[in-house]
Amino acid sequence: MFRNHDNEENDFFENSEIPESSSSAKREEEPHYSPDDPRYWEGPEDEFEHLRPAPRSHWRLWVWIGAAGLAIGIIWGVWLRLFSPYVQDAWQYGYVEKIEKRGEVFHTYEGVILPYRNLMDTTRVYSGDFEFSASDPKVAARLIEAQFDNRPIRVHYRMYHTRMPWRGDTKTLVVGVDSVLEKNILPPDRQPETLVAP
């Protein structure tokens, strides 16, 4: 009824010398080469090779290239929007109506110029004042002198897309001031009367 377990030939669990299968032995004997090794391409082609996913090194490379391109694009866009003027060299003639110093952290000069063309044009509706900012104290001093003397000036300005605290409250930044004669900017019928000595 019960078998005798003293026979070691029939005991498969305690026998340490179990013969390996031919397939596992074949797998261990076959060397594994990387695609960089020329011997990799000499062996037989695996029928499931086309189902294996592509190496991730190329995927990571494209992710880094995309991230670098995105970062460069953001930096370039911010620089164009905040720091690069879209109007470089522009000029305006007129009279300084007011100028004042403003700011708590960044002190800038804010002012208004009455453009002479708008003042002298009788055919069109007045289009508005020329509001500006000036961050250079020397430029602001010349603007204040022109306001006190009530003489026309020519201002050189730049225009930006965005207002920034260190540039002032407006998008227009005056960078230069020149004095001009009224006879050079006013039409002949609007020339000021000069006093002639008797």
Image: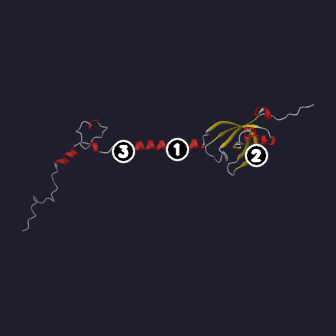
User: 10 Å neighbourhood of mark 3: few (<14), some, or many (≥20)?
Assistant: few
**Which residue, given by chain and number where applicable, does mark 1 sit on?**
74
Residue 159 image position (x, y, % from top left)? 64, 41
Q: Secondary structure at mark 3?
A: helix
Inspect the image, locate mark 2, and give the three-letter code of the amino acid beneath it.
Lys
User: How is colour applied across the structure in the image?
Assistant: secondary structure
**Which residue, given by chain and number where applicable, does mark 2 sit on?**
98
Q: Are marks 1 and 3 in contact (CB under 8 Å)?
A: no
User: Of 129 and 8, which appears nearest the observer?
Assistant: 129
**Which residue, given by chain and number where applicable, does mark 3 sit on?**
56
Q: Point out the frontmost of discs 2 and 1.
A: 2
Rounded to the nearest whole Å, what is the CA distance between mark 1 and mark 3? 27 Å
Q: Is residue 120 above or below residue 22?
A: above
> Is 8 on the left-hand or right-hand side of 196?
left
Q: Where is residue 192, by image quadrant?
A: top right
Residue 23 image position (x, y, % from top left)? 18, 47
Inspect the image, locate mark 3, and give the three-letter code of the amino acid beneath it.
Arg
